[in-house]
Amino acid sequence: MVCCIVEVQYILDSVILALEANPKRKFSYVETAFFYRWWNQQDDAIKIKVKQLVNNGQLSFILGGWCMNDEAATHYNAIIDQHTIGVKWLKENFGECGRPLVAWQIDPFGHSKEQASLFAQMGYDAVYFARIDYQDYARRKKDKELEMIWKASPDLNTELFAGALYGQHYGPPPGMNFDIYAQNNIQDDPRLHDFNVDAVVAQALKDATEQNAAYKGNHIMWTMGDDFTYQNANTWYKSMDMLIPAVNARQANGSKVNLIYSTPACYTYAKNKQNIMWSTKSDDFFPYADRVHGYWTGYFTSRAALKGMVRDTNNFLQVAKQLDILANRGADRSSDSALDVLKRAMGVAQHHDAVSGTAKQVVTYDYEERLADGVNQCMGLVNHAYQKLTNSVTTSFTLPTQELCPLANISMCKAVEASSSFTEVSARTKKIPERNGSVATHDMWFTAQLPPLGFSTYFVSAASRSFLTNKLVKVKPASDVVISNDLLEVIFDGTTGLLKQISNLKSAVKMKVKQELMFYVGWDKYSGAYKFRPKSQNPTQLSQTAKVQVFKGSLFTEVRQTFTNWGTQVFRLGRTANHIELEWTVGPIPFNGTIGREVISRFTTDLMSQGVFYTDSNGRQILQRQKNFRPTWTLDVNEPVSGNYYPVNSRIYIQDLKRSCQFTILTDRSQGGTSVANGSLELMLHRMTTSDDSLGVGEALQEKGSDGKPLIVRGKHYLVVDTIAASAAIHRELAQRLFMAPVVTVAKTTPAVIDKWRKYLTLRQSYIRTALPDNVHLLTLESLGNNQLLLRLEHFYSLNEDSSLSKNVTVSLQDLFSTLTIKSVKELTLEANQYLEDSQRLKWNKKSSKQDYRPIGNDFAIELSPMMIRTLEVTFQ
């Protein structure tokens, strides 16, 4: 972060001066976060000059998000949020001229279909990128299909013009890097001994001709820049000022090459006017390989703890924004800065070298510190909101300060843990070093009833040990262990201790399922933060058997498995659950400096999946995958495992069409996953590598815990076994419940305070009159100020997924919120920087790309079709 900020500010200082010197010069800028920091350091005179440059088109913004987000490890909710804060800032400071028209994803390591769909819904005309698979690139270059129409969503019919940059990189043509350190400057004075303009022009004409042969039409784009260039912009612009007229002068001798200063938006417009019939693409650009054996699939899992923290923090951010609105602070906007701190921290965390796990350790600490600081600052907002929502401000009773328990996953919450004892903490959990100083010996579990868009208050006090209802069950030697509820039965092998079978008692689906913890040994110098390259395609078991303990209680039954001292699991089946919770704990991974282990959870079933499996795209669309296959080119298989790994943001599943059954695994963070054999699924949990993969991090992936030993990571999977027809309703709803789980806050108090709390304060409240339909999710609820709020509602089912839930649905806003009276509603584009009725996207292949604008009547009824997100500006009294 520090190096980027320092160098970016010098770039902008230099570029502004260079643009002022010549009105023909242009510069396109990406990533609002860095521009925002530079802008805040400028005086009014500089700001006026910059606004003039934006207004006359010399300085333009592309993409516009707070950052250039990763496309594999990011959730669609966080992508939308980080774009919203970026373009909002641009609009506030530069108006309509600051609105980006194209997306610029040149550095992420693969590109998702859902990201393209979001861009189309945001109103962009195109997206450009550099990194696509080397085999895909070669085929597209030969067939002149490096540019295409991306059919990004079959549900919404969204299309987006997409272009892969020439040479699989975002730098200038060979010999055209005019940065001060490159020493490629042009000399056009024939009186000087280093006169070279003729040679440079000849090279430029050759490069232009070769590049044009790979694209349709007669316009090509030269990206004149690279990482951290333009710290001395004059060297670039002075050289280009000489190059452009020198190349164009050759037209007198028959040359057809014409150079001009331009922007990606202008290039897109020029391409659009040529009325070319473009090829189409309907899948995505994962996985990405830059060469033989070079699959960038390790980062799908790298820094698993950070990935989990980003997911949890996004959950909290949504709650904080909702509480901000529900408390209706009106003129009191004192907590805006706290929300902004967290929004910006979350925005930066979506960067393609942040949540991806591909930053240095010290930079990763910085990301984590920013997230933690944002959460801590927003707890002031949360407490302020609770004071109002519980009516504490109208009484003489002051609500005790609420706190979070960020380490509750390892049974630690210092705010209240000394108060009482409940279900005993496992021996494995007690040994996690981050629990140092904790005195908690037990966990507490109870069933809580929570109203929609609301809160409930529970008071907990210590009781006798007779209330410890989770008891250790004696297991008969060599006998299978069976746990069940009214919906599911789970069997563990009596000899090995491994999962053996799952049965859905309601749908009569019985499935053999074996689950193991295993690891691949990474190839030294090739497996790193970005890449995954195993030495062997066959992973090693942590252990062939697992020691099993069974704990049974009134709410759930646990089967605790111990494979080794660094690999343990807990299977948990709730009393009424339609899924099985699997909590895994991995680490400290044994490490002696010579063997890097990449740990997976593998499930082997008796399903005949025929090499086909399914993964989500950024937590939303579901894409079909097939082993050793790519839809748009013939794959040369050189890495049977890593070449079949895909990003899994929320779920992965396989189906048996003959038996009409499905096995689904949901995740609590982004991971890499695949199906390497018929009926098999695996997810990578944690990684430790021996060396760097020489792709930019500059250090091996060797995370340490608080004790200096390899980091222990804990996470969860959720297993669903059912018919194909019934599975979507379960995994779609469960994914939303997990991603937007209720946030628990705690306060240490006394019996006397509890008595007053019960007497004076509201203990339970909902802020919507009627729960939303089962296929609709409240995606965004946040303040816009001035009695306005930003509301996003989404239909989160796809077409034909479910017989009833995949249908259109209508939601009436008029009576939705119990404490807000709506005056007007206007629809916006997805990133909320333009009214939808004003959005005019370019048309391609004579088909309209204009978004479907549906006027909203006085009843404020909002219709949603499958996969639709509607973004609304709501004005209330």
Image (spheres, rainbow, N blue to C red):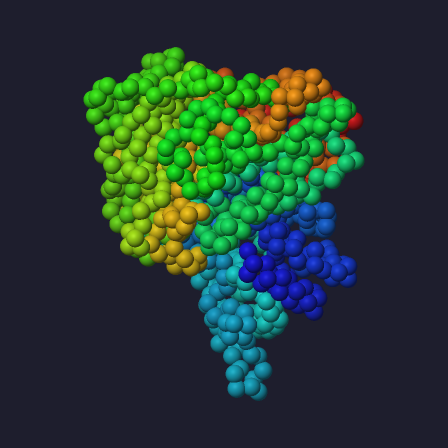
Query: From the viewer's perspective, is residue 19 above or below residue 630?
Result: below
Give left or right: position of 270 versus 287.
right
Residue 800 x/y as whole percent? 46, 23
What residue appears at the point 67 percent right and 59 percent down from the top-left corner? Answer: 58
Residue 269 visible in rendering: no
Q: Nearer the viewer, residue 148 or 451?
A: 451
What residue appears at the point 34 percent right and 21 percent down from the top-left corner? Answer: 472
What residue appears at the point 41 percent right and 29 percent down from the top-left corner? Answer: 425
Q: Quadrant of the N terminus?
A: bottom right
What residue appears at the point 31 percent right and 30 percent down from the top-left corner? Answer: 561
Residue 54 x/y as whole percent? 70, 56
Q: Nearer the viewer, residue 248 or 163?
A: 163
Quarter where residue 714 is shown: top left
Q: Nearer the viewer, residue 384 or 72?
A: 384
Residue 543 x/y as whole percent? 25, 36
Give left or right: position of 2 versus 492.
right
Give left or right: position of 237 versus 148.
right
Query: From the viewer's perspective, is residue 512 above or below residue 705?
Result: above
Q: Quadrant of the C terminus?
A: top right
